[in-house]
Amino acid sequence: MNSFAALSITALGKRIRENETTSEAITADCLERIAEGNAQLNAFITVLGDQALADARDADREIRGGRDRGPLHGIPISLKDLIDLAGTPTTAASRVRQGSIARHDALVVTHLKSAGAVLIGKCNLHEFAYGTTSDDSAFGPVRHPLDPTRVAGGSSGGSAVAVATGMSVASVGTDTGGSIRIPSALCGVVGLKPSHHEVSCAGVVPLSWSLDQVGPITRCVDDARLLFEVMRGKSAPLLHDGPARLRGRLGVPRSYFLDVLDNDVRTQFEDAIRRLQTAGATIDDVWIPHAADTPAVYLHIQAPEAAAYHAPAIERHPEAYSPAVRLRLEAGRYLLAEDYVRAQRGRDVLRREVDAALEGHAALVLPTVAIPPPPIGAAEVEVSGSKEAVRGLMLRLTQLFNLTGHPVISIPSGAHAQGFPSGVQLIGPAGGTERLLELARACEQQLR
C-alpha cells in the first residue's frame, strides 16, 4: 500500500501537481483499501470503481493540460448514501428505496464535480439517518475500524470509517442531531456541522427538514475547510502553512453536559482542556440554563418532521423499514401539533441561551460523545454505575446545536484508556463557521 492515507488534500494535490503521483494512483489506492476492508467494515453500499478510475484519468489529463480546478481536483471523495448522485442508487440504507436511482445530482455534488473531485462511492449509514450507531441498515451494520464488534457511530458511520481507513480521502455526511460529529469522534477523524443553511440540502433525503445539515468528514481541519467552501459554492480558500496561535477565551458548559460521562471520556476531556490552557487559551465555565430540556425540545421537532416525510411510504410498505426505525417513525405520528409549536418556542430560548454563553468567547468546548463506541446491538451501557440508553447518551452532547443552528466541529483529541479515539467539539457563534475553522486548526495542533 502507498502512504496516501496519511496525507491531507493539500499534500496529495501538491504531489499530483509535482508529478510525484496521479489522481489515478490515489483513486486506485482507495479502491484497493475498499476491496480489502469493506467486507468486514461495511463502510460502502455502492463502489464506483471503473467510473472513479475513468474520472481520475480525466482529472490527470486536465491538470497536465493546464486546466486546474483547484485543491479538490483529482481527490477521491465518498458520499453518504442519502445524497443524490445522478445515475446511481440513493438507498438511504433502506429496503424502502430499493430500485431508486437518482435522476439529478444533489447541489453539493454539483459543486464537488465542478471542483474536479473524483466521486468514489456511496457510504453506508443508519437507515434514513434515524440513529446514532449505523447498525440498523438494510445492508448490515457499519463496524468500527479498531474493533468490528463495536459501532462506528452514526448516522454517517460509513463515511467516517471510509476516511479513517483511507478508503476515501474525505466524505460528505449529514447531521441532524450529531450524525457527522458522533462517528467522526468515535473513528478519530474531523467532522464539521456548519451553521444552519450554509450548505444546501437540495437533493439530500431528509430526516428532519429544520434540523438537517450537510457537512464534510475529513482527515484534518484544513481539509474540512476546503470541502466546506466548495460544498457551499465558493472558491477553495488559500490555506496558511505553519503553526496557528491559540488565543482567546473558551467556555465550558459543564452543567448537564458533563453530568453523565464515561470515566475515560471525562479524563480525556479534562486533559484536552489542560492542553488548550497550556497553549494559551483562557477557559471559563459557562451556563446554558435550559440545557436539560434539550432532549424534549429536540424530540418534539425532529420526530414529527420525520414522521411527516415518511407518512406515505410507511402507509404503503411498513414492513420494509427496520423495526427500530419504524417504531420511531410511528411514534412521531402521535405527537400533538401544540407540542411541536411549544418545542419551536423552546428552540428559540435555547438559541438565545447558547448565544449568551458564547458572549466574550471564541467558542464553547465539550466532549463530542459521552461514551466510547458501544457493542453493536447494545441498547444500554453502564455509565457511572447506572444503566443508560445508548441513543440518549450518544446524542446528549450534540443535538442542542442542531436545534440552535450554531456551527460545530469535532476534532480528534487522542485516545481513551481503552484505545478508542476521543473527540472534542468546538461550538462557534452563529454564522461564524470560517472563524470556527481557524480556531479549530489551532486547537488541532495542540490535541493531536
Image (spheres, rainbow, N blue to C red):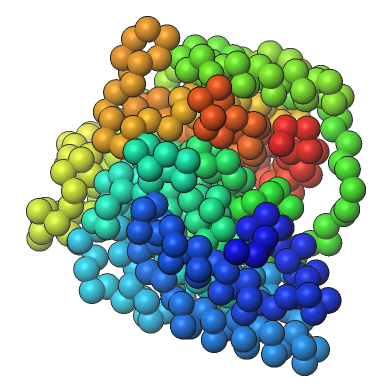
Using the image, determine if residue 237 lies above or below residue 140: below
Q: Is residue 367 left or right of residue 157?
A: right
- From the top left corner, tell me how far across and down residue 437 is, in percent: 73, 45
Position of residue 251 relative to residue 306, above or below, is: above
Q: Residue at x 68, y 13 (%)?
A: 285
Is 359 situated left or right of 175 in this image? right
Is residue 29 in sight in this rendering? yes
Q: Which quarter of the figure has residue 381?
A: top left
209 relative to 283 in the view: left or right:
left
Q: Quadrant of residue 352?
A: top right
In which quadrant will I find the N terminus? Answer: bottom right
| Residue pictured at 85% horizontal, 32% vertical | 246
Task: Depth check: give the residue in front, 193 or 10.
Answer: 10
Q: Residue at x 31, y 48 (%)?
A: 141
Q: Can residue 114 be seen from the camera position used here?
A: no
Q: Nearer the viewer, residue 382 or 233?
A: 382
